[in-house]
Image: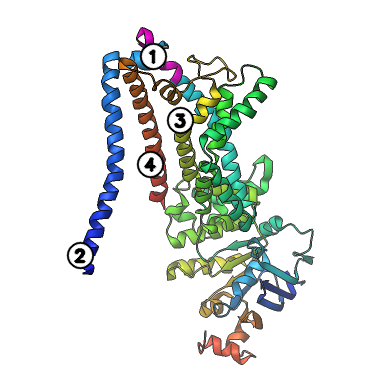
Amino acid sequence: MPDKIALNKFSVHYGPDPLLQEIDLEIQSNQILGVIGPSGSGKTTFLRALNRMNELQPGFTASGRIMLDGEDIYGLDYDAVSLRKKVGMVFAMPVPLPMSIHENIIYGPKLSAGRGWKYDEAVVESSLKAAFLWDEVRDRLKTSALRLSGGQQQRLCLARTLALEPEVILLDEPCSGLDPVSTAKIEEALTILKERYTVILVTNNTKQAARVADRTAFFLMGKLVEEGTTQQMFTAPKDKRTSDYITGRFG
Amino acid sequence: MPVTSEKIMQRLLLAVAFSALSALLLIAVFIISQGLPFIFRYGFREFLFSSQWNPQAGKFGIFPMVVSTLWVTLGAMAIGAPLGVAGAVFLTEFVPRTVMRIIKPSIELLAGIPSVVYGFIGVMVLAPLIRDHLGGPGLSLLAGSIILGIMILPTIISISIDSIMAVPKSYREGSLALGATVWQTVRMVTLPAARSGIAASIILAMGRAVGETMAVIMVTGNSVKIPGSALEPVRTLTANIALEMGYATGMHRQALFATGVVLFVVIMILNFSASYVMRQRKARR
């Protein structure tokens, strides 16, 4: 099977400082890739590179290539807006837009539908169900999304991303502020979602990567130290730094 | 002794603060005590809704001035609000921060230009333009609206910029990550989230427009009648007071104070609603 995403000597600089250095990595579809590493290791920069969110802040420059289905997403004529519809993102802090639950879900599809403003209303139910949120909000879709609890907001953000029917889903520490029950719900959703999507999960919680990821990548100081199947990474890592990090000797 | 000096400073600052407050109170009491009895004596309805303004004959109906003030203000808002909000959006969302840091203070400088200068430009440039291209005497409701529309730009732009910048970055990123363009994000997320601040900026600007006197006197022509079109000369409430106070005595003088009471109330209402809208925003956070 061809790689869904392939990075080729991909680097990101902020001003003169390197944030990511010459990353080479292939990512297969229908898998969860866990990305671990201490803070400041470039995990988030890596994730935000995949849907070109870094470039929204002035000062970021990227070099090298990222191929999505064989197309260079940093190519001159590649449209970042259409890329972000294919590569959805869930942030560390749940950030529902200041509108109702229903409007949050249809926000993306409505924009994609363009002038006709036609979209499938069924997407609201299906994406909320896929994010394990439907039962909790089915009676109050018109209330403000800001009234939901933190865990519910994060699942809403996941549902909102799913409503776009992306091909790749990026998650940036989606459970960092959540209780164990909400975390379990999101993890459960992810393991089902990988059947249809390519999932990339940045997490500070190595156990979470061990639980849900098929493959795991370890970043340190802007470099990709090691990548392999999760089982191999957690039982027989090749690099000493990886085993040190996983066993909690630093970071 | 540091403690005594502390106490002295405290008293001193208290006195200063109260003197500012008492100045406001004195003005309010003075205007109301001079104007309110007249309104009751002359009749509230006669005063506000009669079109007869003829001080020599003892007729004091300010309706034409009320209507003119309303039209000039609405015209100014129609010109200033879209320009101001669009300018604020442009400067916050479409221009690098460094450029904004140069342009925003320059716009705020507009507020520092004396209003007589605006009036002067209105008389010398705007009025002839209107006269030559649209007809009428030039000094008109339209000229007043345009000049005021420009004068309120700094208020609208700088408060709108502040409230747009106060919208959390995460809202923008969330929207962009869902495949929205910058413009879609502005329209559907940023502007709705900043709307109370923008509304407050427009209300405050309205207060400025209602209260502006000098520039308005110079460009509106000042004839007391209900305007039939935007090209006709009008006289606003503020202009009425400023033009006639110099020679007014007796009833006439009281009528002008009563006009002041009307203005005072209108501007109070505008300011209170602006701060109310602002508070609503804080309460929601």
Helix, strand or loop status at disc 2: helix
Q: Which residue is mark 4?
A: B276
Residues at badges 1 and 2 in contact (C-beta under 8 Å)? Answer: no
Q: Amino acid at mark 3?
A: Val
Q: Is residue B1 above or below residue B202?
A: below
B60 within the magenta span = yes
Q: Is residue B56 visible?
A: yes
Q: Which residue is mark 3?
A: B210
Mark 1 vs mark 2, foreground winner is 2
Q: Which residue is mark 2?
A: B4
Number of numbered markers: 4
Residue furthest to the top in view is B57
Query: Do discs 3 and 2 belong to a common subunit?
Result: yes
Residue furthest to the front in view is B247
Mark 4 vs mark 1, foreground winner is 1
Residue at image point 65% right, 42% down = A118
Q: Amino acid at mark 1?
A: Gly
Q: Which residue is mark 1?
A: B61
Q: Amino acid at mark 4?
A: Tyr
Boundaries of the magenta span: B56-65
Could you say where residue A157 lies in the image, as x and y percent from the top left?
54, 58
Q: Chain of mark 1?
A: B
Query: Do discs 1 and 3 belong to a common subunit?
Result: yes
